[in-house]
Amino acid sequence: AEKAALFYEKQAATGRLAQVLAHEIRNPLTNINLSVEKLKYPDIADREKYFEIIFRNSQRINQIISQLLFFSGGTEVLQRPLIVQELINGVITNATDRLTLKTIRLQTNLPHTPIRIMADRSKLTMALLNIINNAIEAMDKETKILVISVKKDRDGCEIRITDNGHGMTEEQQRRLFEPYFTTKKEGIGLGLPTALSILNSHQAKVDVISLKDTGTTFSIFFKTLDAVPA
Ligand code: ADP
Ligand code: MG
């Protein structure tokens, strides 16, 4: 974990953010490509929907570039009180197109009472999206289900992300936070080291449970702020 954090600082310091940028841009670009593919057929239904996806995803790429320009300017973490449910809803909005295009069913389980943590919203969003994007990429079965749940306990809360994808071998589980470790043809292997580095800077703990051919669960534990009336 510490190795990954160190690595990340070095990456930022040496300005090799191009790789991170490439990784983050690939998702919206894939949405655009898939939509263009669909629009090739002149009589396809929902043309509006695909144009809308193209529009939204090109905006998303713009947003990512701004974020990374900011990132390369310094890795200072700006922590503010943040409601976990709002964070999760933002993350889900961002992933909606990828879920739709891969016909993944999303189940959420969020408590009604707002849970507050100290966090850097944009960085934590990036960390959660890196985990969720892997979950999306891992699912190839007929029925694809992503479960995102939040649970509060005495002095903390847990965010749990479960997919019923192809899972990991034990060797893969040991190595998944290693920089440049990837099992994908087009993978870069920086998504999880980046996520871990961000989560470490939030004093969050991460747990992974995975079963080959069955699925994977990422659990993230945060210290919460004392309840403030919302
Ligand atoms: P990349 O996505 O570019 O391969 P990551 O750092 O995001 O890099 O992930 C590293 C590797 O961890 C992936 O290539 C994959 O083998 C494994 N992995 C991560 N999340 C999952 C998941 N939910 N299901 C199966 N494998 C996963
Ligand atoms: Mg990834």
Image (tube, rainbow, N blue to C red):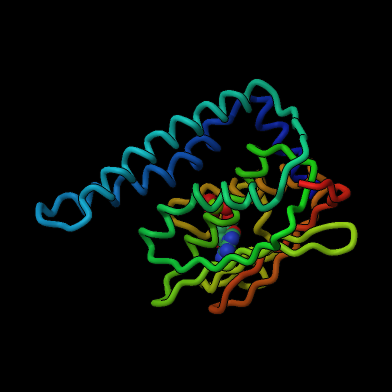
Q: Nearer the viewer, residue 20 or 229?
A: 229
Q: Nearer the viewer, residue 73 or 175?
A: 73
Percent of width and height locating residue 219: 72, 63
Percent of width and height locating residue 185: 43, 56
Which residue occupies the extreme front position in the image?
Answer: 229
Total labels drawn: 0
Which residue occupies the extreme left position in the image?
Answer: 42
Q: Where ligand 1 lies, by quadrant? A: bottom right
In this picture, is 61 found above or below 86? Answer: above
The residue lying at 37 percent from left, 35 percent from top is: 58
In this picture, is 131 found above or below 167? Answer: above
In this picture, is 168 found above or below 47? Answer: below
The residue lying at 62 percent from left, 44 percent from top is: 125
Q: Nearer the viewer, residue 49 or 229?
A: 229
The residue lying at 31 percent from left, 42 percent from top is: 54
Percent of width and height locating residue 84: 70, 50
Q: Is residue 195 left or right of residue 99?
A: right
Which residue occupies the extreme top position in the image?
Answer: 73
The residue lying at 47 percent from left, 60 percent from top is: 137
In this picture, is 37 found above or below 215? Answer: above
- Residue 221 position by quadrant: bottom right
Q: Is residue 208 left or right of residue 61?
A: right
- Residue 28 position by quadrant: top left
Percent of width and height locating residue 135: 54, 62
